[in-house]
Image: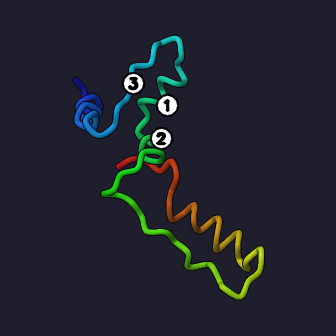
């Protein structure tokens, strides 16, 4: 077994990864991809605290700095699809 297969076997107790047939190659790739798993599977050990530092209570429907201080900073903070450690 390779190192990746051993690591996946160790995680199997926590995350059930179904056997996907070769007929569905994209689904099979997504089921075995560590980046997708790190993004979509909730792990209490690596859970980040919610980031609301850009919010200002005096703003109305669209807060100031919503794009750079809000959306882009959230993407940088939460790092979706970041390389799995």
Residue 64 at x, y = what percent?
Answer: 73, 80
Label 3 crowd (10 A; few <14 / some 14-19 / many >=20): few
Residue beneath label 2, please? 36
Horizontally, residue 60 falls left or right of residue 20, namely: right
Instruction: Verify CB contact (< 8 Å) between mark 1 and mark 2.
Output: yes
- At 48% from the left and 27% from the top, the residue drawn is 29
Instruction: Verify CB contact (< 8 Å) between mark 3 and mark 1.
Output: no
- At 71% from the left and 77% from the top, the residue drawn is 65
Residue 19 at x, y = what percent?
Answer: 39, 20
Secondary structure under the numbered disc 1 in the rendered image: helix
Cα distance between the residues tagged 3 and 1: 11 Å
- At 25% from the left and 36% from the top, the residue drawn is 13
**In the foreground, 26 or 47:** 47
Name the quadrant of the N terminus: top left
Mark number, residue 18:
3
Please name which of the two marks, 3 or 1, marks the residue nearer to the observer.
3
Dot 1 or dot 2, earlier in sequence = 1
Secondary structure under the numbered disc 2 in the rendered image: helix
């Amino acid at each position: 077994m390779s190192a990746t297969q051993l690591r996946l076997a160790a995680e199997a107790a926590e995350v059930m990864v179904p056997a996907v047939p070769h007929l569905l190659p994209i689904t099979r790739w997504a089921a075995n991809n560590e980046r997708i798993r790190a993004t979509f599977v909730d792990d209490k050990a690596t859970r980040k605290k919610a980031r609301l530092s850009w919010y200002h209570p005096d703003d109305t429907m669209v807060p100031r700095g919503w794009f750079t201080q809000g959306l882009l900073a959230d993407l940088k903070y939460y790092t979706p699809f970041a390389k799995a450690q």
